[in-house]
């Protein structure tokens, strides 16, 4: 199984899921700031997972 760089992107997004809400968005009183962040992050995680699993089922030479 080859190493996929998209896995590192998912880990970076997981790290950002802690840093951004508890670090940068602590002073934002409106819920819309965190809602937009979580929506964008969720879409990025789905895209990264699609890129990771696109080669599943193909035989390696």
Image (cartoon, helix red, strand yellow):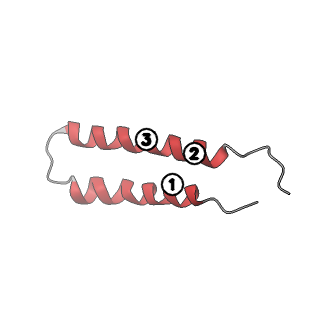
**Disc 3 element:** helix
Say few, some or many: other residues with alpha carbon within 10 Å of mark 3 (under 14 / 14 to 19 / 20 or more): some
Which of disc 3 and disc 1 is earlier in sequence? 1
The numbered dot on residue 10 is: 1
Query: Which residue in the structure is indicated by mark 2?
Result: 49
Q: In which quarter of the image is residue 32?
A: top left
Instruction: Determine whether 19 is above or below 40 in the image.
Output: below
Query: Which residue in the structure is indicated by mark 3?
Result: 42
- Residue most toward the front? 61
Do the numbered discs 1 and 2 sit on residues whose CB atoms are within 8 Å?
Answer: yes
**Disc 2 element:** helix
Using the numbered discs, state the Cα–Cα distance from disc 1 to disc 2 in whole angstroms.
Answer: 8 Å
Q: Position of residue 16 (x, y in %)?
A: 37, 57
Residue at 28% in and 52% down: 21
Quarter of the rendering occupied by the N terminus:
bottom right
Residue at 63% in and 59% down: 4
């Amino acid at each position: 199984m080859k190493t996929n760089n998209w896995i590192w992107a998912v880990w970076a997004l997981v790290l950002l899921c802690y840093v951004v809400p508890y670090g940068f968005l602590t002073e934002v009183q409106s819920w819309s700031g965190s809602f937009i962040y979580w929506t964008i992050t969720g879409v990025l995680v789905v895209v990264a997972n699609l890129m990771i699993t696109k080669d599943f089922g193909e035989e390696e030479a």
